Amino acid sequence: MPASPVVVDEHAPNPALQHQFATEGQQKNAASLGMWVFLAQEVMFFGGMFCAYLIYRYKYFADFGSGSQQLNVTLGAINTAVLICSSLTVVLSVRAAQLGKRKALIGWLLLTIVLGFAFLGIKADEYAEKFEKHHVPGPNFSYHELLPGQANLPPAERQYANPRHAEMYFSLYFAMTGMHALHMIIGVGIFGFLAFMAWRGKYTPEYYTPVENAGLYWHFVDIVWIYLFPLLYLIDRHR
Amino acid sequence: MATAVVTDSGERETYLNVAHGPKSWLLTVDHKRIALLYLLSITFFFFIGGFFALLIRLELLTPSGDLVQADTYNKLFTMHGQVMVFFFLIPSVPAVLGNFLVPMMIGAKDLAFPRINLLSWYLYIIGGVLMVYTILNGGVDTGWTFYTPLSTEFLKTNVVSAALAIFVAGFSSILTGLNFIVTIHRMRAPGMTWNRLPLFVWAHYATSIIQVLGTPVVAITIVLVALERLFHLGVFNPALGGDPLLFQHLFWFYSHPAVYIMILPGMGIVSEIVCCFSRKRIFGYKAMTLALVGIAVIGFLVWAHHMFVAGISLYAALAFSLLSYFVAVPSAIKVFNWTATMYKGSITYQTPMLYAFGFIGVFTIGGLTGLFLASLGMDVHVHDTYFVIAHFHYIMVGGMVMAYLGGMHFWWPKISGRMYPESWGKLAALIVFVGFNLTFFPQFILGYMGMPRRYHSYPPEFQILNVLSTAGATILAVGYLLPMVYFTWSMRYGRPAPSNPWNAAGLEWQAHSPPPTFNFDEQPVVTWEAYNYDEIDSIPEMGEVPVAR
């Protein structure tokens, strides 16, 4: 595209317009593109783990299915719903910022934070269960569970999952959900900051780029979960 | 240019004298000041990495392992590699010259995100502090590649702090790339269309794509290595069915494109220098831009040529071999086009041009030996020998460091506002060229004869070539120290530089030397193609002879 034209602004300069930009439109476009480039980076960051998951699931499919059945699919589904709702509240906060509704903006941001904490709380509960069942990789890991589809067989014929490969499954489970949870924590922190700035009246219908970009980031974190949920919780649930 | 702002003491206000004191530097958001912060920091790490190289070469002076023990030697080559790759080569040209010049070349006041630019530098420094801690705490001996399960299961050295250092420095690199991509998209001056961009800017655009898309993969990979050491997560643990090849794939997915992070900006510099000192337009501008982007794209598809003997399938090896040959095509286009640009040009032999000549010759040797290594049969013979060492040092040291030094000389008048001493510059360029080739050419022969890399002792018949290599390294060290001395000298005693000492094309030369904080007195508007040397030289009052002596 051609270079942005330089428009001399006759009106008083917007205090949010930084020195390096000629116009507010240029500043907004730059911030938005910057966020998308950052998200491309995030895709590659998570991509490394998805790649590892793909390869090991292909190699140790039955054991991964066994490990998957140890997860609490109800809690996982509730968390999925919580995150989708939080994506909605983020969109509503962006809309409130566009319309200049300061109280609504703060309210939606706070509700997003609450949903974020709800997700993290449920996740913490799931992690605690893994500790109790010794399903956390490391010296204390122990695993004695059937392969998928074996429960209906006579006891003598039942086959058990290879505990080493199950440990690999839980290594990936903790790495992927842990990295996702870390992104959630950062997101909650960002929304806390935004709510504070909104309370101080920093955002106007002319300038609400930080809210929009934080929303983009939050949607990305949600989408990662939308992939993690079926890959970790739902493999082999069709049996 | 009569509108320049004047400071209290009557001097023209520049980015250097606009503010004083440590705070004005450590909290600056001016891309030019941040470039200088990077210049100091990467020079520091260059000499740390160089110190390790010196110890390596001293050990290899004699066949027996007499200077250091084998374990110490392992640490020396590991830390040489990690410091040089992650703390010097990757940031070198983008973070110093790119930071300084990309906004000026496109006619902008600054990068799109000046504060993120400063954050990049702080991340680099945090990573650097962790690296120094790693070194002082006894070092690390994984090899720069962190191969598992050696790094995860067996070594007792500072793997985690080294991994963390590289992780943090990696995000510095990602943010620099992000800043450049957005800046080049959104901050160009009116009339500065994509097809008028200097190739230096195109090179940084291609580099930034690799930085943004490649670095996060190695970041998560070394995080997994650290998690494996700290919390026993077993993603690469063979006891859990973990695959060492997976680590190597993920590592090289970044670390091969990283070679192009190191060489593409150098190609940008050489394009600028060759045009200026041949007084000609670049030959095949479109082909040059496509070649830069082509190298970045194909460069992502060749990584497994590092793993031909690691146990990947024959068919995968064939595919990666073929793709590695493909990446030579755009590289060759660049070499041919530089040569064609010089053809019938009015060539002058100033210091930057000497470095450009050196780059083209040395890069050609490095590139062609890369084709040897991309062929499956030859690679089995010379894999993990000094042939590989010589090959990639021809690209990284011969190619990138020469381009970096050429660029530093070319733009030093703009950066410092002073001319460097030309005859000393020419002498140093010659010393670097001789020292470099004497250091690394014998290593091709050593490798072909079968001397393996990463050993601190070797059979006596290899000694003569190793002595030559060590002698060359000594000469090279002199060649690197000289510019440091006369650049520093010139900051005080050098002849004041005019705005455009080389009578060069490019917006950066329309700004004062050194530029004011916002670079240009008024918003530039571009109505010409890049490298319009025929137009510049046809205007009599502008066509003065370049002022080199």
Image (cartoon, coloured by chain):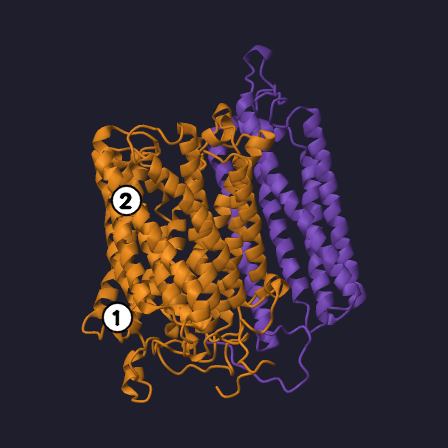
User: Quick one: label 2 or label 1, which is nearer the N terminus?
Assistant: 1
Q: Residue at the far top: name it.
A: A156
- Where B165 falls versus B500 (above or below)? above
Pick the quarter of the image with the C terminus of chain B. bottom left
Q: Which residue is nearer to you in this view: A28 or B459?
A: B459
Residue B400 in view, yes or no: no
Q: Chain of mark 1?
A: B
Q: Residue A178: horizontal and vertical position, in percent?
A: 63, 39
> Residue B471 got which mark?
2
Give the CA distance from mark 2 to mark 1: 39 Å
Q: Is residue B201 left or right of residue B136?
A: left
- Where B78 falls versus A115 (above or below)? above
The answer to which quarter of the image holds residue B145 is: top left
Amino acid of disc 1 = Phe
Q: Which residue is nearer to you in this view: A208 or B465?
A: B465
> Residue B391 got which mark?
none
The residue positioned 57% from the left and 73% from the top of the image is: A20
Helix or strand or loop: what does disc 1 sit on?
loop
State which chain is coloured orange.
B
Q: Is residue B545 left or right of residue A160?
A: left
- Where B325 falls versus B224 (above or below)? below
Helix or strand or loop: what does disc 2 sit on?
helix
Q: Residue B448: horizontal and vertical position, in percent?
A: 22, 37
Mark 1 — residue?
B283
The residue positioned 32% from the left and 64% from the top of the image is: B424
Is circle 2 on the same chain as circle 1? yes
State which chain is coloured purple.
A
- Packing grade of label 1 (10 A; few <14, some 14-19, many >=20) is some
